[in-house]
Image (tube, rainbow, N blue to C red):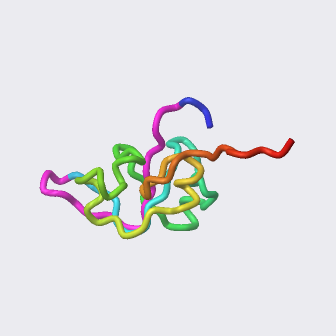
Amino acid sequence: MPARGEPSVAASGEWVDDDGVRMPAGEVHAWWPGTNQTLCGLALSRSRLHRFHHVRWPETFPESGGSAAEVRQVCRRCEGATGRSSRGWSKGWTRTSPRP
């Protein structure tokens, strides 16, 4: 993955917080602004996903707080593509007893 920082969010729904800012709701996907699809391969327009340039991917995880208030599901394929997980899994694996 290119070193672009964190991807933004595309979601199946939206809600407006107390400050009048649109926030993601429903199922959320990771998305690079300037592209026409999510990291898992869904076309934004055909999937009718709302784009949130101002919301970064880590903000959609439940432990992050505010932006995740109405998020119901985080796309597992997008989690894998970004290398970040809301489930606390460790990145990668190592063989502890390799064969000779």
Q: Please state which of residues 51 and 63 is positioned toward the viewer in this rendering.
A: 63
Q: Is residue 28 left or right of residue 37?
A: left
Q: Is residue 28 left or right of residue 70?
A: right
Residue 16 colored magenta?
Answer: yes
Quarter of the rendering occupied by the N terminus: top right
Q: Position of residue 38 (x, y in %)?
A: 56, 54
Q: Position of residue 14 (x, y in %)?
A: 32, 64
Q: Is residue 59 left or right of residue 41?
A: left
Q: Is residue 58 left or right of residue 63?
A: right
Quarter of the rendering occupied by the C terminus: top right
Name the residue at 43% across, 52% down: 9
Name the residue at 61% across, 57% down: 40
Stretch in magenta = 4-20
Q: Please state which of residues 69 and 20 is positioned toward the viewer in this rendering.
A: 69
Name the residue at 17% across, 54% down: 20
Residue 35 colored magenta?
Answer: no
Q: Quadrant of residue 27?
A: bottom left
